[in-house]
Image: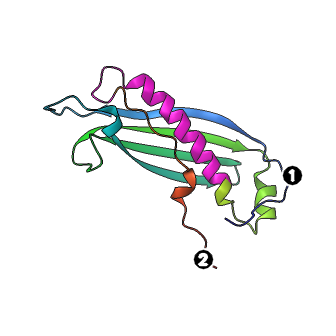
Amino acid sequence: MKKELPDGFTVFWRIRNLDLISFNVENVDLPNPIAPEKVSFQLGPEVNLTAEKKEVVINLTVSIYSDESRKILLGSIKTRDEFEIQNFQEILNLNNNKFPPNLVAALIGVTISTTRGMLIFLSKNTPFEKAILPIIDPAIFFKPPSE
């Protein structure tokens, strides 16, 4: 990924709010206990930027499946993280009026981490209680820029 902000540039940000939007456990009959290492997660982040509010809002939906075939949905969680970027306009000015994808990816990483913590707490006594949302590179949600 090409350089988007100058070396030594500091992004001043804070988490403004964390919300659990929904958590659902499907009522499915499973013939056998689910092995935690077989559980599969599908992540869908939605990013909204508001320059006037100096805000980045990330809604993350995670669908939880019994295995990689994703035929049996076990449950889902949806969270919302709100970030305040104090130098939002300066970032836009330095990046041709665009918000850098690597900065968005870093904030998605924070959202995935907070969702992981919520999921560990909420999934107690569910079929997927021992499955942990893996650590992933949030850059996978961005296509590389075409040259």
Q: Secondary structure at mark 2?
A: loop
User: In which quadrant of the rendered view does residue 98 lie?
Assistant: bottom right
Q: Secondary structure at mark 1?
A: loop
Residue at (66, 56) in percent of width and height: 102
User: In the picture provided, is 2 more to the left or to the right than 32?
Assistant: right
Q: Percent x, y for residue 31?
A: 13, 32
Considering the whole magenta stretch, tell me its main secondary structure.
Answer: helix
Give the answer, above or below, for where 43 lies relative to 18: below
Residues 136 and 11: in front is: 136
Mark drawn on residue 8: 1
Mark drawn on residue 146: 2
The answer to whether mark 2 and mark 1 are in CB contact below 8 A is no
The crowd level at tag 2 (other Cα within 10 Å; few <14, some 14-19, many 20+) is: few
Sequence-wise first label, 2 or 1: 1
Residue at (63, 53) in percent of width and height: 104
Residues 55 and 43: in front is: 43
Residues 109 and 36: in front is: 36
Instruction: Identify the magenta region.
Output: 103-128
Q: Quadrant of the C terminus?
A: bottom right
